[in-house]
Amino acid sequence: MIGFDPMYFVFLAPALALSLWASFKTKSAFSKYSKVRVATGMTGAQAAQRLLDSAGIHDVKVVAHQGMLTDHYNPITKTLALSEQVYGVPSIAAVGVACHEAGHAIQHAVHYKPLWLRSTLVPTANIGSTVGYLVMTFGLVLGSMGMFLVGVLLFSMVLLFQVVTLPVEFDASARAKQLAVANGIVLPQEREGMDRVLNAAALTYVAAAISTLLTLLYFLFRAGLLGGRSRD
């Protein structure tokens, strides 16, 4: 077996540090602005519904969803699910998250191409995340470059998915920030808090992509394709 390799942590340390920092920033910003009531008194669900209505979208349901920050938009069922901390809460943080998810619904309605591409990549990304890592590992253990390269290809699908996810998430946040003010959901002076929550959340996607990239580079290094030396 490959066993313990200090180089793995050398490669992954930057991503780990960024992930921890992004997670801290996200939780900290959400916690802070969850305590700040939005001046309009609108809840997350009401904010999301207003954005959908303003965009002429009437076939998307806004529903409550269990779990901590499990907010998401499902383009297949056209359901905008908001977590317990967002759905019925009239805070800047809740409204920001809800408007972000509504931004995804708007992307879907206007046929935003990166969103379509991300949805298309979901099956291959799921396979790559569960199988790619193992195939790369066994390729190294067995000394099979062919198997290793198949694993690299599969795992690369995860990276591709995460890279495509970045513009999708940033665009949804940009729509949320602009439309929340334009539709009277938040006051201009409340945008700062909303921006901090959404910007912090965006960092988690950047951290995930960097982590996958560095993992891939580590395996290429171990295989001797980046100046490293393959070891059984």
Image: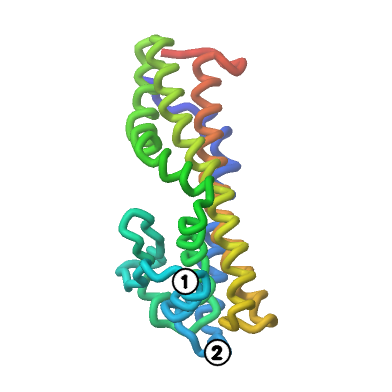
Most foreground residue, 54 or 140: 54
Horizontal arrangement in the rendering, residue 60 relative to residue 168 (left or right): left
Which element carries disc 2, helix, strand or loop?
A: loop
Report the residue marked by disc 2.
40
The percent coordinates of residue 137 (x first, y second) are 38, 23
The percent coordinates of residue 93 (x first, y second) are 52, 75
- 10 Å crowding of disc 1: few (<14), some (14-19), many (20+): many
Q: Quadrant of the C terminus?
A: top left
Which element carries disc 1, helix, strand or loop?
A: helix
Which residue is painted at 45% across and 32% down in the image? 157
Report the residue marked by disc 1.
52
The percent coordinates of residue 112 (x first, y second) are 53, 51
Q: Is residue 20 above or below residue 185?
A: above
Does any portion of residue 173 appear in the rendered image? yes
Which residue is painted at 64% across and 84% down in the image? 187
The image quarter in which residue 139 lies: top left
Task: Name the kind of residue labelled 2 in the image.
Answer: Thr
Q: Mark 1 or mark 2, which is nearer the start of the sequence?
A: 2
The image quarter in which residue 73 lies: bottom left
Q: Is residue 113 above or below residue 45?
A: above
Most foreground residue, 86 or 24: 86
